[in-house]
Each structure stands twice: as C-alpha cells, then as structure tokens.
Amino acid sequence: MKAEIITKLEELLDKPAGEVANDVRTLQKEYQKQWTTEFETAKQAFVDEGGKAKEFVYEKNLDDQKIAELFEKHLKLKKDDDDKINREQHKNLLVRQEIIAKINDLCQMSSNVGAAIKKLQELQTQWKETGAVSTHKYKELQSEYSKAVENFYYNLKIFRELQEHDLKKNYEHKQELLEKIKGIVSLENIKEVERLIKVYRNDWEDIGPVPNEKWETLKTEFRAALDDVYKKIKSFYNAAEELKEGNLQAKKALVEKAKAIFEGFDKKNVGKWNEATNKLIEVQNEWKTIGRTSQKDNDIVWNEFRTTCDEFFNTKKEFFSVVHEQQGDVKKAKMTLIEKAEALQNSTDWAKTSQDLIKIQDSWKKQHLVNEREEGKLFFRFRKACNAFFDAKKAHQEALGAALEGNIQIKEDLLAKISAFSFGDDVAENLNQVKQFSTDWNTSGQIPFKERKRLNDAFYTKLDELFEQLNMNKSEKLLLQFKSKLERFVLSDNAAELLQREADFLRKQIDELTNNIKTYENNLGFFKNAKKDNPLLKEVNDKIDNERQKIADFTAKRKLVTEEMNKIRNSVKKTETA
C-alpha cells in the first residue's frame, strides 16, 4: 500500500503543484490513516508481550521516510508556485496603480480633450489586458480605478452634449448588463455563476458614468442583483461539511492569533502583559463561540490552542514574580517625586511651578504600581502636596478676578452710551465717533470671563450697526469693520490663534479664487475664434474681473492680519529677551 502511495506521489510531483494539491492532501489523509493503524497494532503487540504502553517507541521505516520526503518536496514546490503567483500579482498591482495614476493625471488636461479621451481608452485597454492581483487588493484597486475613470468624465464639463450622449449610452449598457446579472440567478452550475458574476462586475466597472439622476436607482438595482447572486452562491456552500471545515479554519486562525499575542508584545512591561491577557481572554471567549469540527481535527487543534494558552500564563506568572521583587525600587522613585512635590507646595511662582508640578505628575503616572496598601499611602501624600499648591493658585486667581469686577461698570456705561448714540450731519465726525467708541472699549480694561462674551457681543453688535449706517464707500466700510474685528482678536486671550486662523481662511479664499480664474482662463481657449461681442465670452471675462477684485480685497485684509501677527511675535521676542 505504501509503495502505491509513493508511486502516486512521484507521479503527482511531475505535475504543477497547485493543480495536484487536493490529490496530495487526499494521499496524506490515506497515508496517515494507514500509519496510525500500523502504530496502534504494533503498540498493542508490544503491550501484549508484557511491555508498558508509555515505553513503546515506533520507528518509521524507509517507506515512511520516503513518503515524508515526497510530501516535503511537494510542499516546497507548492510554495514556489505560490511565490511565483504572488510576484506576478504584485507586478500587476504596480502596473494597475500606474494606470490609475495616469488616468488621474488625465483629469487635469484641458487643452487637447480628444487626445485625453484616446489616451484614456488606451489605458482602459491596458487595464483589461493586465493580469490579476491578489483578492484582498482587488476591491480597493478596482474602486480606485472606477473612481479615476468617472472623475475623468465628470471633469470634461465643457463637452456637455458629448457627455450627455455618453452618459445615456452608459446607462443603456448598464441596464443591459443588469438584466444579464439578474439572469444568472437561474443558472444551475454554480461555477459558471461565479465566473460570470466576476466578468459582469468587471464589465460594470469598465462602463463609464451614467446620468446623476438615474445613478442612485441604477446602483440600488445593481446591488440588489449582486445580493441575489451572492445569496445563491452562499447557500450552495452552506453544506454541513463546509461548515465544519470553516469551523476548523476559524479555530486554526485563533491558534495563530493566540501565538501572535504571546509573541507580539514587550514582555518586560506590566501594562503590556495586562493588555495581552485581556486580548487572549477575548480569543478564548471567541473560541467558545465556534462550533465543533470533526473529532480528530478538533482534538488536534484544541491541544495546540491549550498548549499556547498554558505557555502564556506560565510565562506571565514567572514575570510577575520578578516584578514583585522590583517594587522596592518603584517605591523609592515615588518617594523622590513626593519630596519634589512637597518642596514646591508653598511656591508663589504660579506659572513655572504649575509646569514643574505637571511634569512631576506625568513622571508619577509613568511609574509602575507598588502593592495596593503602599500605593494608597504614597498617592495620598503626593496628592496632598499637589493640591496644596493648586488650591493656593486657585485662591490667588479668584482674588485677581475680584479686581476685574470694577471694569464691568465701565463697560456697562460705554455700552449704554453707544446704544443711545445717533449720527449727526458731519460724516467725518460720525466716523471719528465710531472709531472712538472702539478705542474706548478696547482700553477700558479686562473683565471676568463669565461676563466677557455677553458684553462684547452686545457692544460689537451695536458697533456693526453703526458701521452699516455710515454714509461711505462700501469697500472702505467693509475694511473698517474688518479692522474692528481684528481689534477684537488682538484683545482676546488667544489672539495669536484667532489671527492665524483668520490668515489661513483668507489664504484659502485667495487660493480658491485663483483656481477659479485659471479655470475661466482655460475655458477662454474654447472661444479663441469667437467674436468679441459673444455673450458667453463676455460672461467669462466678467467673472474673471470679479474674482480678481475679490482677491485684491482678501489680500488687503490678509496684509492687516499679518501686521498684527508680526506685532505679537515681536512682543514675545522682546519678552523672551528680557
């Protein structure tokens, strides 16, 4: 019998490893069954002759060794084939990624659209002719490819009539393809169903975009049709033996996951041990939710899983026995931090001491825990020293807050004054009075935070109303309002942050307007043979002039913001130098 297995194996080794993998596995099972029978027979004979079962040793003969060598050779050939496929798939992946990048580059073309469309078709042909990639990369890559193709078509807005024609044709093709997908549900040959659904999905992605108003309905029907096909495929593979095989693979995956947990963390770190323990317990709980496999496979995979878990917890026990010995050093380090905190608890250098204590607290958090009884005492003493300083700091800040209460009435009086103010006939005097209101408000001192928003909102709302009533050029008026806004920013607690945010916003607006102008100027290329009085040409030129004026306004505002930011930076530098 073994000779027959050897002969079959030698014959199979002359064929491609991937094609005969199932046949080799069948021979493995057949050989294992035969060897087990011989082993049990020999063992029983040994016991019958008076030997002890645990002392029995069964040596493999030359045929066994030969079979093992042949199995090992097949395994190596199979691995070589798999490596070759993986290399080829990786090469195809790079080619497809390059195709996607080229399509994305085409989306930026506007001067020679005909050449761009031709180039896209060439890239699509190259995409179809390029070999397969790995299955876990396929969906994401195909999605990127589809997105790139659709972006190309949607960016060619100037060719609306051609686009509408293409969208209509694409819609018709996708409807035809949708009917084909619905039709394969009735096929009996499941392999043919799987083959066709892959072909049709690829064809679907290769077809260009459809009208936006029809896309959602079409997409919903497409997904529903796919769901019906995959439900049919799934039900076919839900047989009992497939379910058991699935359970076996799931348990093998958990074995590998448990091994990865044990091997994949810093075994000198207590926290990492606790994290790994929680993860392993989750894996153990997940194991309990998986159904059984065949009895033989279940015993093998369970023994491997239990051995891995036992090794993990035994190693953990040894580690923590050493940790307990090291807690004396941790206690000494925490005592040092306590002494530092106690030395700072009576300090009145509020800013510097706050930072120093925060750093000490961060160092405390990084220390390991000692035993529960000692940890509570140490932390109580440490917290007491920190609280002594921060409570004193809080009392100091509350005293400062009381000093700010007096400024509330000053601002209330200013608010009443601006609320009662009305303009006279002198335009210049009106403008000076509005500016004076702003100056008086900004120099009236700080107030408690709880009142700041209420009073500022009321004052600046009234100030904006006065700006609106001023009889002056709209641009000048908007610029004055913007300067008033900057004054608010400068006087706020986070002036630098607000100014930087405003500068970024203005920069973004300028960039968007600049891009709009580039788009309009590119579109002018389509009117190079048009007459000067062409209404579409005039409309585009008017849009360009309008966008340029907006850029000038935003640039002027950004210059004002930059000046205020520079003042703050120079002030900080002077303070640091002092």
Image (tube, helix red, strand yellow):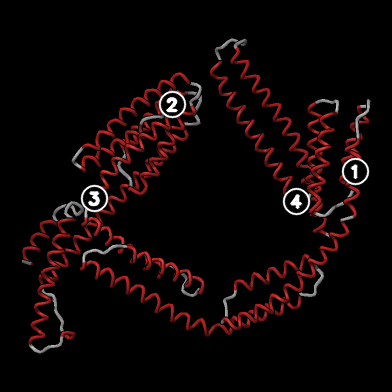
Q: Which residue is mark 4?
A: 494
Mark 4 burial class by Cα count in 10 Å: few <14, some 14-19, many 20+ = few
Residue at position x 41%, y 20% in the image? 165
Q: Single out the mark in the foreground, 4 or 3.
A: 3
Q: Classify mark 1: helix, strand or loop.
A: helix
Image quadrant where residue 143 sits: top left
Q: Earlier in the sequence, mark 2 or mark 3?
A: 2
Mark 1 burial class by Cα count in 10 Å: few <14, some 14-19, many 20+ = some
Q: Position of residue 108 (x, y in %)?
A: 50, 31
Whether residue 546 is situated above or below residue 243 in the rendered picture = above
State how far apart marks 2 and 4 are (Cα): 49 Å
The dot on residue 570 is none
Instruction: Tell me the amino acid under the disc marked 3.
Output: Tyr
Q: Position of residue 407 (x, y in %)?
A: 89, 52
Instruction: Tell me the amino acid under the disc marked 1.
Output: Leu
Q: Which residue is mark 2?
A: 211
In-image side of 515 versus 86 (left or right) = right
State how far apart marks 2 and 3 are (Cα): 38 Å
In-image side of 352 versus 241 (left or right) = right
Pointer 1 with pointer 2, Cβ within 8 A: no
Residue at position x 67%, y 26% in the image? 547
Q: Classify mark 4: helix, strand or loop.
A: loop
Pointer 4 with pointer 3, Cβ within 8 A: no
State how far apart marks 4 and 3 are (Cα): 63 Å
Q: Which residue is mark 3?
A: 237
